[in-house]
Amino acid sequence: MTFHPDHLIDALGHQHVPAPGARIVSLVPSITELLCDLGLGPQLVGRTGFCIHPRDTVEHIPKVGGTKDVNIEKIRKLAPTHLVVNIDENEKPTVEELAQFVPNIVVTHPLVPRDNLALARLMGGIFGVDTAAQQWCGAFEAEYAALKALPPAPARTVLYCIWQDPWMSVSGETYIAAMLAELGWRVPRLGEARYPRFDWSEQIVGQLDAVLLSTEPYRFTEAHADTLEKQLGIPVLLVDGEMMSWYGSRALAGLRYLRELRAMLEGGS
């Protein structure tokens, strides 16, 4: 299937046209991985230091800083035709400065797991790898169907922790919460912030079925999980942060990971 150019609209509503020979700089680690998996590694001329997958491919691609502390001049010298960014991960003033000399800015903003289908089709349509994108979408649909075919399980309230000192969690408006919602799990409301700080209290712990400690951005370990579980008296699981929060290729694996996560909490059911 070939995607009509009218479908190549990014998260800000900007229309794009097919550009098979594009020189691409990606400032989004998860999308860098997707681009590589779609066969676009040779066209990636720049990536962030956080773009670490797939390792064998990205190690040959020049680094241009982080997702927020971008080296403008490095990107200028690389002369990209396209810059791939994300609304949550990249700073708007930085992107606006880059737009002064990069002809095409592709803005992404997946909100729920199935948004990855549109993301793959957008990348495939713009960069001339429609067939690879369609194959990826087929694999995603198969994993999603397997997830939805699981027998019903009780709804759960889980606290997903991304940091300690101070303790921080995620709100219901985040992509992580949308991933958890695919299992029928909800996160508690801890305030208005997207990534709220909190203190452990009987009121919070009393409404929880489990606590999930993410391996990123804070590097929680099994030792953290064991210690906290003894303190709280409820299940505390260490979870792979990339599987829960990355878009693109990692989201495909993430659907499979959700099934494993449910089995961990449900005792293998």
Image: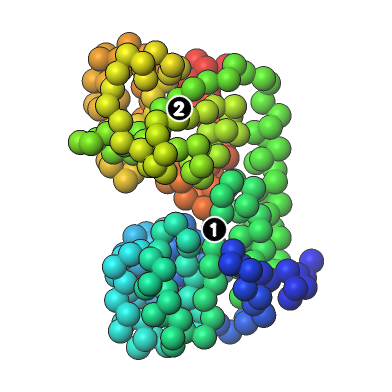
**What is the tally of numbered marks visible in this picture?**
2
Image mark for residue 109: 1
Task: Name which residue lies at 25% across and 15% down.
Answer: 231
Q: Residues within 10 Å of mark 2 (few under 14, many from 20)?
A: some
Name the residue tied to disc 2. Answer: 188
Task: Name which residue lies at 75% across and 73% down.
Answer: 6
> Viewed as shown, does residue 76 lie left or right of 110?
left
Mark sitting earlier along the chain (2/1): 1
Residue 3 position by quadrant: bottom right
Residue 264, position as x, y percentages in the image: 47, 22
Residue 63 position by quadrant: bottom left
Secondary structure beneath dot 2 equals loop
Height in image: 18 above or below 238? below
Q: CA distance from mark 2 to mark 1?
A: 23 Å
Image mark for residue 120: none
- Colouring: rainbow
Task: Name which residue lies at 70% across and 43% down.
Answer: 142
Secondary structure beneath dot 1 equals loop
Residue 143 visible to an observer of this rendering: yes
Task: Name which residue lies at 52% across and 53% down.
Answer: 247
**Where the N terminus falls, by quadrant?**
bottom right
Residue 121, position as x, y percentages in the image: 67, 63
* Residue in front for this viewpoint, 111 or 40: 111
Height in image: 194 above or below 97? above
Amino acid bearing label 2: Pro
In the picture as drawn, the residue positioned furthest to the front comes out as 192
Amino acid bearing label 1: His
* Residue in front for this viewpoint, 56 or 34: 34
Residue 11, position as x, y percentages in the image: 59, 64
Residue 40 visible to an observer of this rendering: no
Disc 2 vs disc 1: Cβ atoms closer than 8 Å?
A: no
